[in-house]
Amino acid sequence: MDVLALIAFLLSAMLISLSGALMPGPVTAVTIAKAERSAHAGAWIALGHGVVEFPVMALIYFGFGALFKIQGVKIGTGILGGSLLIWMGIDMLRVFRKAEISELSYSFSPFTAGAVLSAANPYFLLWWATAGAVLVSKSMAFGLLGFILLAICHWLCDLGWLYFLSFMTNRGGQFFGKKLQQGVFLLCGLALIYFGGYFISGAALTIQDLIAGM
């Protein structure tokens, strides 16, 4: 196993995962709301999120793993996943000057809220059916270990961000200034566009190889 290639893959996967976690959404909003009562709310929300997310990842790997070996499927997921990342990146660049996160309140416990909001979020399933599926398929090059490390690293990004968010919100309200928020949105938006283009270019190379082999 090429350890350096594995490390490079995991680093890119973590950057993509973190960029997705930073996107304002229901999980981010409820984390801020729950942080008023507990600085550790983000950790419980991440656990609830993981209860839903790990089975989805396992289903992709074990249930549909053979599909990713089909060239047409690899091309399709590469194009769809890359397109979704580019769309996410453009959307982040479009709103980065606002960088506003809505504050919502839910009656669920933090753990339950993390699970329910993840399972009920169409965007969550769409991400794993496209961009997430690409990451899982690329992890297969490193065997089961590669997939396990991908799952752990991806979830740790969620855990780290949500816990940081709830802890800092609980301690001081607005956890960082407007300028820094804008900078984070800008960098993540550019990163998503880059990796989206990378996925699409990979699909294009696969098409070229298929044509050359005819």
Image: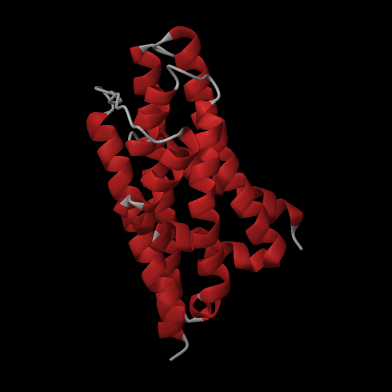
In this view of the protein, which residue sits in the foreground, 52 or 4?
A: 52
Location of the N terminus by quadrant is bottom right
Residue 17 position in % (x across, y down): 49, 44
Question: In the picture, residue 43 is in which quadrant?
Answer: top right
**On screen, residue 172 above or below 144:** above
Residue 7 position in % (x across, y down): 68, 49
**On screen, residue 64 above or below 2:** below
Location of the C terminus by quadrant is bottom left
Residue 159 position in % (x across, y down): 56, 36
Residue 9: in sight, yes or no?
A: no
**On screen, residue 19 above or below 52:** above
Q: Is residue 190 left or right of residue 153?
A: left
What residue sits 52% from the left and 68% below the top?
59
In this view of the protein, which residue sits in the foreground, 54 or 126?
A: 54
Residue 79 position in % (x across, y down): 35, 64
What residue sits 41% from the left and 39% below the top?
113
In this view of the protein, which residue sits in the foreground, 194 or 127?
A: 127
Residue 88: in sight, yes or no?
A: yes
Residue found at the very far top of the displayed protein: 172
Q: How many marks can you see?
A: 0
Question: In the picture, residue 28 is in which quadrant?
Answer: top left
What residue sits 71% from the left and 61% below the top?
145
